[in-house]
Every structure is written in C-alpha cells, then in structure tokens.
Image (spheres, coloured by chain):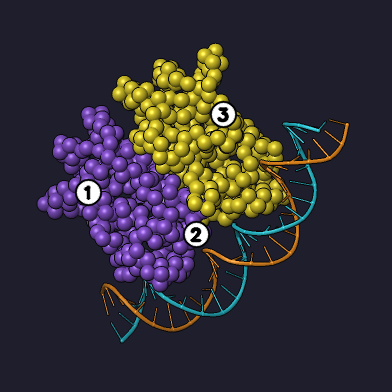
Chain colours: A purple, B yellow, C cyan, D orange
DNA sequence: CGACTATTTGACGCCAGTCAACACCGGTGG
DNA sequence: CCACCGGTGTTGACTGGCGTCAAATAGTCG
C-alpha cells in the first residue's frame, strides 16, 4: 500500500487517464472527474504475474489500472490459459463485478502495475447521485464487452498472423487515446507467452509470427517496445476496423 | 408486424421469459414486470437467416427475443462468419446498443423468430424511474459479456469436441432457466453450419464431433432436437462450470 | 559468474480444414 | 404422382497450419 503522500498524485493521474478515455466518447465535467478521484480509497503497486482477483471470490471493490498492464483470464484443467482482455491504464478491470458480485474469471498483473481500488459502496453512490457519470462507467463496461467480441472473432476465425497484427493494432489505438502511444510506437511490457495466451496460440508460434511481421517490415516488438513501421499494411493484414472501439463523441 | 390482438399475448410471454431469467438472480416485482411489458411498442415475426440489425447503423430500439434463436455475429472479408453469442427467448440481443448507440456487430435470426422492439426512449425512462430494474437490465448485459468471455476460452483453448459439448451444456442450462429444456432434452432449431460459426469450426468438423458425441452416448442432435444422455460425462468433457452464468440469487 | 526467464529456431506430428462425392429431405412444379 | 432442386447432413481422402518437443542463444538479476 502506498502512503497518503505517494498516493494522491497517482490517483490524480490514473483518474485523468480514465477521464481522457471517456472524454473521447462524451463530455466529462471537472466535477465528475473529482467525484471519481474521491471514490478511490487505496492505491497499491503489484509485481508482474500476481493474481489480483480470484474468480468466485465475493467482491467489494473494483480495480482501476493506473500504470502497467493487467489482464482478465481463465484457464482449463490442463493449465492452458486464455486471456480475455488486456487492460491498459485508465481501464477498470472489474467494474462489471459491481453487479455480478463475484467474477467468473481471474484478474492478474501482466507487468509490474499500479492499481487504485474503488469500493462498490462508492460506485453505488455514483449510480445514485451522478446518473450521467454512472452511464459513462457502464459505457466503459460495454466497451470492454465490444473488445471481447472482437477477440472472439480473432481467436475463432483469424489466422495466427492476423491475430497478432490485430491485437497490436488495437493496443496501439487504445494506448494512443490515453497518450501512451505516439507515431506507432509504444511500450508493451508483456512477454511473447502473454501474447500467446491473449491470442489463443502457443508462444512458439507467436514468435514465428512476430518474425514474419518483422521480416515483412510491418512491425517490430523487442524489449517490450512495439514499433509499427507500416500501419496500412498491418491494419490490412489484421482486417482491423476501429469501429468496435466506439471512438465517436456523442451524448450517452 | 403483428396486429394488436396477436401482439399482446406474445409480449406477455416474452417479458415473462425475461422476468423468469432475472428472477433466478434477484427479485423482480410484478410492477417491474408491468413496466417492461409497457415498454414494448412492436412485435414482429422474422424468417430464419434475416439480418435484424446491421453493424454501424444508428440504433433507436433494442430487440427482445420472444421465440426462436437469434445471434450476434461478425465476419471477415473472406466471408467466414463468427457467431459471438446465440440468444434464447427472454434475451435482449442488443441492449448494449442503448449506450453504444450503434452496434459493432450484426444481429441475425438463426431460426424463424418472434421479436419485440423496445425503443431506447423507454429504456431511458426505466433508467431514470426504476433504478433497480435498470440495474437488472445492465446485469443482463453483464451476463452476456460473461457468456462471451467463456466463448473466448472455448474458441481459444478448448478442443473441437469440448467446444461443441460446452456450447450444448450452456444452452441446456440457459433454456432450462426459462423452462424450454427439461431432462436434458430441448429444441435447438439451428443447423450444423450455425454450430460451426458459433464454435469457430467448420460444419464438416462439427458433423464429425457430433458423431463422436453420439457414438460415445453423450448426446444426440437430430432434427433440431438435442438429447443429452449423460450430463456428467458431457459436462466433464466440456469442463463445463456453470459459475459464469451467475445463477445465484442475491440483491443486485 | 550462475541461475533463471525469455527468445529463437528446427524437426516432426496431429487436429482440424479442404475438397469432393453422396444421401437425405421437404418443397415445388410439370 | 414423380422429377427436380436447393439446403442440410454424412463420410472419406488428403492437406496444411499450428502444436509439440527439444536445444541453443540471449538477456537479466542477484
């Protein structure tokens, strides 16, 4: 747990990222942003690979990611893991737990991460006193669902190369929205094994596909840095269409 | 479009199915059920294979399924189709469109179907005047998201046999909740090609897996009727765990 | 330097896709 | 009444994309 003095600026920047993400889609007032800041009660730093929420456990708070990458995942008895969604800063990883009461999947850190905790009591208060802000929070859960639907298409029908290409395109745009990607270049502190778990492949095959993307000069991914060299060809190989990210600004 | 006289009992039964589904998870008052009935403005019957909502088109109403099977799907340029979710009666297929404003995927009928239309204006009124009912509607969108996450695990990591087995288990439980499945036997008016699109396989391979499930005396699927002969072995082959269907009753 | 994790590459195998032929069924029209 | 037809289901032969296994290399942290 961070001390009070350390926590305040982290909360400020984490909520600013969430607000930035939402402001692409609708107006968020300064007051609404303040309400969000006030709803955070705790900030903590976690190492990579730590399970933050275990499926089935009753939930009383939700997790706002401030720094790093965390994910939702399930696994089979064999130990094979499937990541349902990778979360970037400004994402609520388990806001849906507010209504579901317990999660059907795990939440784990992929890289070292900083998270803020928001008690469900505070969310309930928001839902009662700030209807528009509440709608925007629900919107963000709908956005996650939309991202997850695109993932079903990827793992169900896209080729291995297209899956990787698509995931990179998506992360590029999502990070761009919060100012963490510029000119097709961004930090992505995850391993190839994580990429495999997110795309329904093996790490060996992910490695082969990354090599192919590199050889074809579409992108490089080295030392946790993604460098997209040819967005057009990459997006085309992925059949990437950002419509599912609902980037249009309108009253919600 | 159905006449007024035909529509009323259909609306009644469709809303009753939705209420039945929700009442497994929390109390729904008779008044709330009446509010839902009053929110329906139109009922129509559609033939199999008709696109009901095209992705990207602005939405002003949501679709409540009363009879038959409809689905959400996306397709690649090659024409390969991936069904993200099969909907059973009592499901709102595009309630999420209320906040997203336009869908990122298509909605189509899989079998002949009867649907009710609920204008977004009426949903907005519910969200303002009936907070608990509104939460229950949002809960149902979270439930869809949970089902879709399980689908990611299926198409990403389960074997072909397990995918089919899992899908059948899920549909059995979901239909049981609304009284359309009993003793492991239920009508499923869809083709093997639809099953393939829902499980990320080809229809040829679905056929092979169905034969295997039949030969191993776990289930038969013939003429649109599913007959589960050995639930234990089927669920075990599928690694089916109903937790993700959030069947627990509690205040939400 | 040593232990460990992550990346890379090659050889080989298998699950599911592809292609093709045929059976079946309900509907339609001559 | 039967020939025809399109959609669906069934099966076999063959192919190929991705998984598996294994070993070498590179990078990282104590």
Give the residue at the far left of this rendering: A5
Label 2 Cα neighbours within 10 Å, binned few <14 / some 14-19 / many ≥20: few
Residue A103 picture location, percent across and down? 39, 44
Residue for badge 1: A17
Callout 2: residue from which chain? A
Q: Which numbered mark, 3 or 1, is in the foreground of this view?
A: 3
Residue for badge 3: B46
- Relative vertical location of residue A135 with respect to residue A209 in this rendering, above or below: above
Q: Which numbered mark, 3 or 2, is in the foreground of this view?
A: 3
Label 1 Cα neighbours within 10 Å, binned few <14 / some 14-19 / many ≥20: many
Q: Quadrant of residue A233?
A: bottom left
Callout 1: residue from which chain? A
At a point 50% along the width and 33% down the height, the residue shown is B52
Mark 3–mark 1 Cα distance, whole angstroms, equals 44 Å
Residue for badge 2: A159
At a point 38% along the width and 45% down the height, the residue shown is A244
- Relative vertical location of residue B87 with respect to residue A175 in this rendering, above or below: above
| A84, B77: nearer the viewer | B77
């Amino acid at each position: 747990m961070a001390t009070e003095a350390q926590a305040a600026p982290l909360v400020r920047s984490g909520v600013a990222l969430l607000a930035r993400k939402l402001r692409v889609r609708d107006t968020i007032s300064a007051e609404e942003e303040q309400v969000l800041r006030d709803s955070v009660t705790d900030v903590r730093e976690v190492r990579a690979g730590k399970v933050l929420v275990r499926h089935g456990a009753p939930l009383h708070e939700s997790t706002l990611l401030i720094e790093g990458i965390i994910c939702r995942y399930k696994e089979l008895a064999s130990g094979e893991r499937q990541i349902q969604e990778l979360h970037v800063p400004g994402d609520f990883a388990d806001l849906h737990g507010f209504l579901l009461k317990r999660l059907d999947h795990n939440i784990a850190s992929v890289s070292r991460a900083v998270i803020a905790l928001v008690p469900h009591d505070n969310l309930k208060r928001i839902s009662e006193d700030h209807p528009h802000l509440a709608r925007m929070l629900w919107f963000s859960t709908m956005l996650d669902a939309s991202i997850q639907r695109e993932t079903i298409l990827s793992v169900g029908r896209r080729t291995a190369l297209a899956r990787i290409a698509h995931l990179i395109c998506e992360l590029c745009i999502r990070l761009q929205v919060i100012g963490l990607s510029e000119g097709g270049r961004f930090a992505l502190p995850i391993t190839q094994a994580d990429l495999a778990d997110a795309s329904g492949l093996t790490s060996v095959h992910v490695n082969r596909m990354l090599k192919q993307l590199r050889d074809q000069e579409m992108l490089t991914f080295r030392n946790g840095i993604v460098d997209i060299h040819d967005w057009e060809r990459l997006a085309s190989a992925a059949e990437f269409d950002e419509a599912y990210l609902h980037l249009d600004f309108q009253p919600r």
